Amino acid sequence: VDLIPAALERARQAASREGVEVNWVCGDAFEFTAPAFDFMFDLQCWHVLREVDEPRVVAKMGELLRPGGVVLMLVGSDEEERDNLGPPKVAESAIRSAFAGGGPFEILSIVPSVFDVSAVYGKDPPKCWVVVLKRV
Protein backbone atom coordinates (compact mmCIF):
# COMPACT_ATOMS: atom_id res chain seq x y z
CA VAL A 1 0.00 0.00 0.00
CA ASP A 2 1.37 3.36 -1.00
CA LEU A 3 -0.23 6.70 -1.67
CA ILE A 4 2.29 7.60 -4.39
CA PRO A 5 1.89 5.85 -7.77
CA ALA A 6 5.55 6.41 -8.73
CA ALA A 7 6.70 4.59 -5.58
CA LEU A 8 4.46 1.64 -6.46
CA GLU A 9 5.82 1.57 -9.99
CA ARG A 10 9.41 1.37 -8.70
CA ALA A 11 8.33 -1.43 -6.37
CA ARG A 12 6.57 -3.27 -9.22
CA GLN A 13 9.71 -3.08 -11.33
CA ALA A 14 11.90 -4.38 -8.50
CA ALA A 15 9.49 -7.26 -7.79
CA SER A 16 9.33 -8.12 -11.47
CA ARG A 17 13.14 -8.29 -11.71
CA GLU A 18 13.11 -10.73 -8.78
CA GLY A 19 10.20 -12.78 -10.13
CA VAL A 20 8.01 -11.94 -7.13
CA GLU A 21 4.25 -11.52 -7.42
CA VAL A 22 2.71 -8.85 -5.19
CA ASN A 23 -0.77 -7.35 -4.99
CA TRP A 24 0.07 -3.61 -5.05
CA VAL A 25 -2.51 -1.14 -3.75
CA CYS A 26 -2.41 2.60 -4.38
CA GLY A 27 -4.24 4.29 -1.55
CA ASP A 28 -4.29 5.66 1.98
CA ALA A 29 -2.74 3.21 4.45
CA PHE A 30 -5.12 4.41 7.17
CA GLU A 31 -8.12 3.47 5.00
CA PHE A 32 -6.75 0.12 3.75
CA THR A 33 -8.79 -2.95 4.69
CA ALA A 34 -8.07 -6.61 4.03
CA PRO A 35 -8.30 -10.00 5.73
CA ALA A 36 -5.63 -10.33 8.41
CA PHE A 37 -2.11 -11.09 7.20
CA ASP A 38 0.43 -13.54 8.65
CA PHE A 39 3.38 -11.29 7.79
CA MET A 40 3.88 -7.58 7.27
CA PHE A 41 7.01 -5.90 5.86
CA ASP A 42 7.36 -2.20 6.55
CA LEU A 43 10.12 -0.42 4.67
CA GLN A 44 10.23 3.25 5.64
CA CYS A 45 6.50 3.57 6.30
CA TRP A 46 5.86 3.51 10.06
CA HIS A 47 8.51 6.10 10.81
CA VAL A 48 6.73 8.51 8.43
CA LEU A 49 3.12 7.72 9.36
CA ARG A 50 3.92 7.92 13.09
CA GLU A 51 4.44 11.64 12.59
CA VAL A 52 0.83 11.89 11.38
CA ASP A 53 -0.85 9.75 14.08
CA GLU A 54 1.29 7.15 15.87
CA PRO A 55 -1.48 5.47 17.93
CA ARG A 56 -3.65 5.16 14.82
CA VAL A 57 -0.92 3.60 12.68
CA VAL A 58 -0.01 1.09 15.42
CA ALA A 59 -3.69 0.19 15.81
CA LYS A 60 -4.04 -0.21 12.01
CA MET A 61 -1.03 -2.50 11.90
CA GLY A 62 -2.59 -4.58 14.68
CA GLU A 63 -5.88 -4.69 12.78
CA LEU A 64 -4.22 -5.95 9.60
CA LEU A 65 -2.11 -8.67 11.27
CA ARG A 66 -3.57 -11.87 12.68
CA PRO A 67 -2.64 -12.90 16.26
CA GLY A 68 0.75 -14.63 16.10
CA GLY A 69 1.62 -12.78 12.88
CA VAL A 70 4.99 -11.10 12.50
CA VAL A 71 6.05 -7.60 11.39
CA LEU A 72 9.51 -6.89 9.99
CA MET A 73 10.28 -3.16 9.94
CA LEU A 74 13.27 -1.18 8.70
CA VAL A 75 13.19 2.15 10.53
CA GLY A 76 15.48 5.16 10.13
CA SER A 77 17.92 5.29 13.04
CA ASP A 78 18.81 8.26 15.21
CA GLU A 79 22.32 6.79 15.30
CA GLU A 80 22.79 8.03 11.70
CA GLU A 81 24.94 11.14 12.04
CA ARG A 82 24.71 12.41 8.46
CA ASP A 83 22.05 15.03 7.82
CA ASN A 84 19.79 14.80 4.78
CA LEU A 85 20.50 11.11 4.26
CA GLY A 86 17.81 8.54 4.69
CA PRO A 87 14.37 8.58 6.20
CA PRO A 88 13.28 10.32 9.41
CA LYS A 89 15.49 9.30 12.32
CA VAL A 90 13.86 7.46 15.21
CA ALA A 91 15.34 6.53 18.59
CA GLU A 92 15.13 2.93 19.78
CA SER A 93 13.28 4.22 22.85
CA ALA A 94 10.57 5.73 20.60
CA ILE A 95 10.08 2.36 18.88
CA ARG A 96 9.80 0.65 22.25
CA SER A 97 7.37 3.29 23.48
CA ALA A 98 5.12 2.87 20.43
CA PHE A 99 4.95 -0.93 20.48
CA ALA A 100 5.39 -2.03 24.12
CA GLY A 101 3.09 -1.90 27.08
CA GLY A 102 -0.49 -2.95 26.58
CA GLY A 103 -0.66 -2.67 22.79
CA PRO A 104 -1.27 -5.42 20.26
CA PHE A 105 2.44 -6.18 19.80
CA GLU A 106 5.34 -7.91 21.52
CA ILE A 107 8.78 -6.65 20.53
CA LEU A 108 10.90 -9.66 19.56
CA SER A 109 14.01 -7.70 18.59
CA ILE A 110 15.43 -4.30 17.67
CA VAL A 111 18.84 -4.56 16.01
CA PRO A 112 21.02 -1.80 14.54
CA SER A 113 21.83 -2.20 10.85
CA VAL A 114 22.01 -0.21 7.59
CA PHE A 115 19.65 0.10 4.65
CA ASP A 116 20.62 -1.72 1.45
CA VAL A 117 23.02 -0.16 -1.01
CA SER A 118 20.84 1.50 -3.66
CA ALA A 119 20.73 4.14 -6.34
CA VAL A 120 19.25 6.47 -3.74
CA TYR A 121 21.75 5.81 -0.94
CA GLY A 122 24.83 4.83 -2.92
CA LYS A 123 27.49 2.55 -1.45
CA ASP A 124 27.30 3.99 2.07
CA PRO A 125 23.63 3.69 3.07
CA PRO A 126 22.22 5.21 6.25
CA LYS A 127 21.81 3.40 9.55
CA CYS A 128 18.51 1.81 10.43
CA TRP A 129 16.81 -0.32 13.05
CA VAL A 130 15.65 -3.80 12.06
CA VAL A 131 12.56 -4.35 14.18
CA VAL A 132 10.68 -7.63 14.58
CA LEU A 133 7.28 -7.56 16.26
CA LYS A 134 4.73 -10.27 17.00
CA ARG A 135 1.00 -9.63 17.14
CA VAL A 136 -0.32 -10.90 20.50
Image: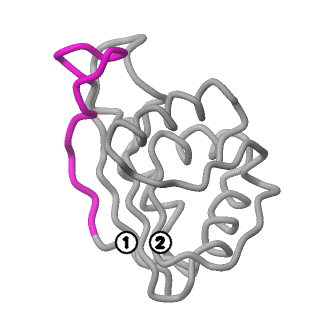
Question: Residue 17: x, y in percent?
Answer: 35, 36
In the displayed structure, would residue 46 be above or below residue 131?
above
Q: In the rendered structure, which amino acid carries the disc numbered 2?
A: Ala
The reply to whether the C-beta atoms of the residues labelled 2 and 1 are less than 8 Å apart is yes
Q: Is residue 124 magenta?
A: yes
Q: In the rendered structure, which amino acid carries the disc numbered 1?
A: Ile
> Would you call the spot at circle 1 few (<14 residues within 10 Å), some (14-19), or many (20 or more)?
some
Q: Residue at x 77, y 54 (%)?
A: 30
Location of mark 1 (residue): 107
Element at label 1: strand
Q: Quadrant of residue 57?
A: bottom right
From the image, give the main secondary structure of the stretch colored magenta: loop
Image mark for residue 76:
none
Q: Earlier in the sequence, mark 2 or mark 1?
A: 2
Question: Residue 3: x, y in percent?
Answer: 72, 36
- Using the image as rendered, state which of residue 97 and residue 113 is in the foreground: 113
- Using the image as rendered, state which of residue 90 and residue 23 is in the foreground: 23
In the displayed structure, would residue 97 be above or below residue 9?
below
Location of mark 2 (residue): 100
Element at label 2: loop
Q: Residue at x 35, y 33 (%)?
A: 78
Q: Nearer the viewer, mark 2 or mark 1?
A: 1
Which residues, given as a range, are shown in magenta? 109-125
Q: Is residue 15 left or right of residue 122?
A: right
